[in-house]
Image: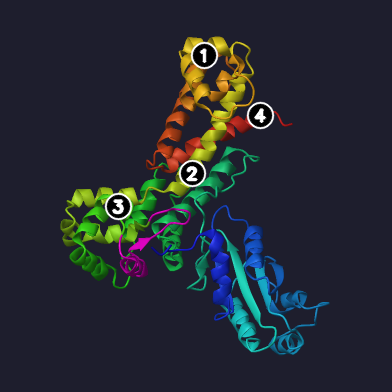
Amino acid sequence: MDSGPPDASGFATRLVASLRAQPAMFVVLPPGREALTAVKALRAAAPDHEHFTIDTPAGGTDFYVLLGDAFPYGAPVRDIDSFILAAGDLHQPRLVTLVGAITDDPATLTEHMKLAGAATRDMAGPWRFVCLVAGAAAPGMPVPFHAWPPDWRDVPQVSFDDGSEEALRQALAHFIDRRIYWESAGQPDAMAALLDRLEMQSSLHPASRQIDETINRVFDAAPLQSDGLESMLANVAGSAPGFWSKALRQDLLPRCDSRMFLNLRATGGAWQPPGMLHGRLTPLALRTIAANPGLSDSGGLTPDQALVRLRRARVNPQVAHMVLTLTAQVEQDLLDALRDRRDWPELCRRAGVEDDLEAARRRTIGSPGPPTSEELIEYATFGQLARIAEAAGNSLRFPLPRERVWMICHLRNRAAHGHGIGWADLSLAIQSVADLAENTVPS
């Protein structure tokens, strides 16, 4: 089966290959992807090129003035003519990566890059350009553009240095970007269209209780724009009824002819998310199926079941991974708070977990040194730590109330088991870590 949208490890190689035919491209970086890591990947993918990274300042600077830094000793480049004259003396391909603020007129920047690339295409040292845009695709971006695919293992970094309000603002931006990426199956034009629609919603602020409802409403109202998708789905339903029935009932696509998957992917009906083993029907495909009773009926789904299947397709493991990382921090802090007490063995007995911890220690392979009762708490699960904390009562100094600890524990379990995670869940995790950060003594 074709892998669909490339994962981050192979994206740079494919991008460099495509630059030989189209020498100028915009690339949108996903949340959590630092520009420096993208630059390093591009350098590794094009070892035969001279590489130059140019930071573009806010407010914009003349394109050709910026290019002067990519010439030996800084050639006096002022316009396309002086650029061509200076470039004629170079004999190695050059890849220029523009990073930073995008000008107020990205279309003009695109034309400059294309013109410079086309003018040097037949020279001994052709020039190629990549403009890296951090964050979500902005309105007015040239389309089509490329979206650097986020790996599901990449966790966006949220800073807690400036308090919970700023942390929640950052987390909401990451949450929206990842929801957009998943809903659009990584297709750049669809990402841009959804972002345009979401930016018109005034209710998207961290304190709102309607964020998930607003996002889903915007997604559901977006036009079903994919040429040939409905007819392709109907063709698959008619020609492969067994495959179609399974595809509608399970989240992961069953094995199928690679040509069928390629045809589904080409029309926006299927994709293989970066870092994942199996293909899936896209949310767009399942919206189309829910809107067409003939497609759902042929797979044995009622209208209500078709809507449930769409909701399952929107369960976003990238958001869940953010929650797993945050809740792991709460678990670690709770473990440290309990380790700091000399009476934790007695607390384990009172909580009724001592035998379970001993069994967990015996199951652990490769524990160095002889077994000792002093290490039993190291084998506690989050739930067992919460029970030990309850046994400690008010004598345990921990910034989060016990009720919150249990909420975080249950949230972690839901995220690990693939249940839907919304903004209310993510904001609970963010607020809890922020509360821990406020009660941490700087080292």
Specify the quadrant of the image occupied by residue 413: top left
Instruction: List x then y, in percent, for residue 151.
Output: 51, 54
Label 2, on which residue?
Answer: 321
**Which of disc 3 and disc 1 is earlier in sequence?**
3
Above or below, comparing residue 243 to residue 13 in the picture: above
Above or below, comparing residue 82 to residue 303 in the picture: below
**Which of disc 1 and disc 2 is earlier in sequence?**
2
Query: Residue at position x 39%, y 45% from top?
Result: 210
* Mark in front: 1 vs 3: 1
Mark 3 lies on a secondary structure that is helix
Q: Quadrant of the C terminus?
A: top right
* Mark in front: 1 vs 4: 1
**Which of disc 4 and disc 1 is earlier in sequence?**
1
Above or below, comparing residue 261 to residue 169 in the picture: below
Label 4 near label 2: C-beta < 8 Å? no
Q: Quadrant of the N terminus?
A: bottom left
**Which of disc 3 and disc 4 is earlier in sequence?**
3
Q: Alpha-carbon distance for marks 3 and 2?
A: 21 Å
Q: Is residue 301 magenta?
A: no
The answer to whether residue 407 is left or right of residue 133 is: left
Residues packed near mark 4 inside 10 Å, few (<14), some (14 to 19) or many (20 plus): few
Mark 4 lies on a secondary structure that is loop
The answer to whether residue 161 is left or right of residue 65 is: left
Instruction: List x then y, in percent, for residue 219.
Output: 36, 57
Q: Alpha-carbon distance for marks 1 and 4?
A: 26 Å
Q: Magenta region: which residues?
A: 256-278
Q: Alpha-carbon distance for marks 1 and 3?
A: 44 Å
Residues packed near mark 3 inside 10 Å, few (<14), some (14 to 19) or many (20 plus): many
Q: Is residue 272 magenta?
A: yes
